[in-house]
Amino acid sequence: MRFLVVGQDFPWPVRLGSHLRLAEVINVASGLGQTDLFVFVPARRSEPCVLPSGLANVRVKTVVRPPPTWSPGRRLRWLTSSGLPLELVQEDSRDPRRQFDSWRRDAYDIAWFSKAASFELLGRPRLGPTVVDLDDLEDRKILGRLSAADADDAVGGIAARARRALSHVQARANASRWSRFQRSVAADVDRVVLCSENDAERSGLANVTVVPNGYEAPALPLGREEVSHPPTLLLAGSYGYPPNADAARFLVKSIFPRIKARVDDVTLRLVGEPSASVARLHRPPEITVVGWVPAIEPELARTDLVVVPVRYGSGTRVKILEAAAHRIPVVSTTLGAEGLGFEDGRHLLIADDPEGFAAACVRLLEEPLLRRRLVDEAQKAFLSHFQWGAADERIRTLVRSLAHQSGSVS
């Protein structure tokens, strides 16, 4: 079989959940046949794009994805058009599309696009049976961000309130466009993919397949039964991703002081590439903005509790699967744990308000029997449902089904 895989970022070294997901798709594709990998690379990337050793049958083309620009002309185009979401209007796709058209083959047995934006930026090419991995639902993230903002206290004068009102109007219009855009993409391809049954149901799309996120089971879990002194909390993720940045601010401003009032020596580590707003949260030794790390394992080894105070978003949180695999207890919001089937009081603790979230954290720092029971059940759930083998088999089944339908394989 001959595959085309298009990615919105080069997934190695793995830094994000989306990197894990794309890397696994490439691993499966290369195991089934010759794979052409076309990847958008952010202009700020400095390290070389190198495939992992042992990955065979892969031909690679990378193209720099220019940073988005927001000119008055593009603003006018977005306001007066009836089509694309805001984020895509900011993109200049002419050079990437030219490079793609001169590099690609005429036809493939399967074309797999990571994210709808990459499919759109390359002109929605039809080079064979086509899959677009939506991964999550952008319109849900935008609307969730508005709900989280509404839950915060409104501050400022008339001008500030007017700016927030205008921002809300624009965001709601953009969410509507993302919803239409996702439906339009689904209508143009053979199958779209999401990572949870929740999102599949919400999408309303008829040609959706669920491929869950996964995590590689460690040879030796890094969690420990006894809480260290001082105890350490961990929130990990890319803070360029707005739901993670919001979670970090919510944690530091509203939750952590309540934990600190009961566990005086507790510390918090924010691990991952920080946004400007998250970088300002650095207040050592209590709160450390660690930044990006080349490997997460040393951070996990020093962690007593993983916290996931995510207030909006879509998809599923790989950070919870990672904690389950390593037997580290978790406190999450309802939305943070959504889509995994993890139950409050069985696999983790769930709380949505600052006081309840802080109280749950304190319990898991002070009750060893509860810690042990939760990590036992979480690890069992991970091993049963969220190792990459389960997702790999769904990918293979989908690929073979589409290839057979098109007559690509006998």
Image (cartoon, grey):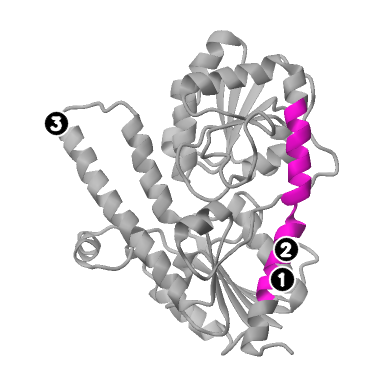
394 within the magenta span: yes
**Residue 6 screen position, x and y as percent:** 56, 71
> Residue at image x 66%, y 31%?
348
> Residue at image x 74%, y 56%?
388
In the image, is residue 236 above or below residue 340? above
Residue 359: numbered disc: none
Q: CA distance from mark 2 to mark 3?
A: 53 Å
Q: Residues within 10 Å of mark 1 (few under 14, many from 20)?
A: some
In the image, is residue 75 above or below residue 369? below
Residue 158: numbered disc: 3
Residue 396: numbered disc: 1
> Residue at image x 36%, y 39%?
147
Of circles 3 and 1, the one toward us is 1
Residue on which the image places disc 2: 392
> Residue at image x 69%, y 61%?
24
Q: Secondary structure at mark 2?
A: helix
Question: What span is colored magenta in the figure?
Answer: 373-399
**Residue 315 screen position, x and y as percent:** 54, 51
